[in-house]
Image (spheres, rainbow, N blue to C red):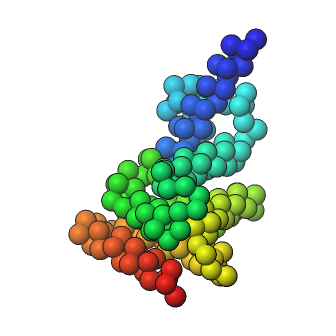
Amino acid sequence: MARRAEQKQQTHDRIVRSAARRLATKGFNGASVDAVMSDAGLTHGGFYAHFKNKRQMIEEALATNQDHLIEQIGRGLGKDGGREALNQMLARYLGKPHRDRPAEGCLLPVLMGDAPHQSAEFKASLQQEVDRLAREFSARMDRADADDVALGLVVLAVGGIALSRAVEDEAYSDRILRAARLVAHAAQRC
């Protein structure tokens, strides 16, 4: 029985990873149940053994993706690394590798464009993940308005990645990333 539960969990995790990759590369509408299940090497029929609906799958993919992202940008920095740790997190988030590998990156830049057209429940899940990233940034600041500054840094970082991926000219894209990092550093000193 334990083996069967382990296999079901592995399949569930495979579906979640497939959904996250689909969301990152194709957006909300590109992550249909059929496409996600096909990418995971499964049939549509098995979907409901794991999720109630598409929204539940997407919310879990978003949360799992954010877990991975926070671990990735904070790797080796500790919770109390201060301004230098925060600058390294921002440099990782606003870096070329994150821009160039959207399938492995944060879902917020992709999903923010679709969010206004989604359910209130989905918007609440998205807000929760924005807040979670802001708390990671805030934990590395020692100032009275850390929560607001951290939220502003999330807005800047997510928008910076989204714009850097949206333009055609790579040099201009690089400039967007540099500008976002510059403003993020300046915001911490205000």
Q: Tell me if I can see residue 28 in this picture.
A: no
Quadrant, the N terminus: top right
Q: Which residue is drawn at 58% across and 52% down?
A: 66
Instruction: State the image coordinates of residue 174 (x, y, percent, origin top left).
Output: 29, 68
Instruction: State the image coordinates of residue 24 (x, y, percent, origin top left).
Output: 49, 50
Picture layout, residue 77 above or below residue 17: below
Give the side of residue 84 with respect to residue 148, left or right.
left
Q: Could you say which quadrant of the image residue 53 lies in?
A: top right
Observer-nearest residue: 92 or 52?
92
Q: Residue at x 61, y 69 (%)?
A: 138
Instruction: State the image coordinates of residue 23 (x, y, percent, origin top left).
Output: 53, 49
Observer-nearest residue: 85 or 151?
85
Q: Could you say which quadrant of the image residue 113 lies in?
A: bottom right
Q: Which residue is drawn at 67% across and 82% down?
A: 144
Observer-nearest residue: 95 or 108?
95
Give the side of residue 41 with respect to residue 160, left or right.
right
